[in-house]
Image: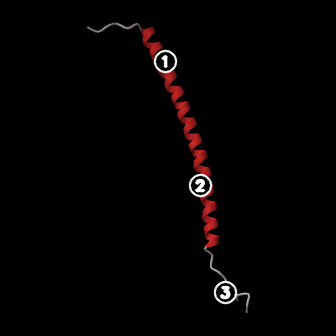
Amino acid sequence: MVAFVPMESRLTELEVRYTHLERQVAELSEVVFAQQRTIDGLLRQLTAAKAEIAQLSAPVTNDKPPHY
C-alpha cells in the first residue's frame, strides 16, 4: 500500500534538498578556487626554480684563471 504524501510536503522536501545542494556547490567552488590559487603560486615557484637552475648550469666561459 502506497502512502499519499501531500504535494506541499513533497515540495518542501525538494526545496530543502535543493538548498543543501546549493550550499555544497558554493563550498566546492570555494575549494576549487583556493586550489587554483595554490597551483598558480606553485607554477610561479617552479618557473623561477627552473630559471635559477638554468643559470647555474649555464656553460662556463673559458677564462684564464687569475694566476695567469
Mark 2–mark 3 Cα distance, whole angstroms, equals 35 Å
Q: The residue under label 1 is which amino acid type?
A: Val
Residue toward you, 56 or 66: 66
Which residue appears farthest toward the left when viewing the image? 1
Give the x, y percent position of residue 55: 65, 71
Q: Amino acid at mark 2?
A: Leu
**Which of pointers 2 and 3 lies earlier in the amino acid sequence?**
2
- Residue extending farthest to the bottom is 68
- Dots 1 and 2: beta carbons under 8 Å? no
Q: Is residue 4 left or right of residue 14?
A: left
| Residue behind mark 2 | 43
The residue pinned by badge 1 equals 16
Number of other residues with Cα within 10 Å of mark 1, as a class: few under 14, some 14 to 19, many 20 or more: few
Q: Is residue 19 above or below residue 58?
A: above
Q: Which residue is mark 3?
A: 62
Q: Residue 3 versus residue 44: which sits nearer the camera? A: 44
Residue 46, position in %: x, y?
59, 58
Q: Earlier in the sequence, mark 1 or mark 2?
A: 1
Q: Residue at x 63, y 75 (%)?
A: 58
The Cα atoms of the two marked residues, 3 and 1, are separated by 75 Å
Comparing marks 1 and 2, which lies closer to the viewer?
2
Q: Nearer the viewer, residue 35 or 63?
A: 63
Of the residues shown, which amino acid type is indicated by label 3? Asn
Q: Alpha-carbon neighbours of circle 3 within 10 Å: few (<14), some, or many (≥20)? A: few
Residue at x 52% of width, y 26% of height: 22
Give the quarter of the figure containing the N terminus.
Answer: top left
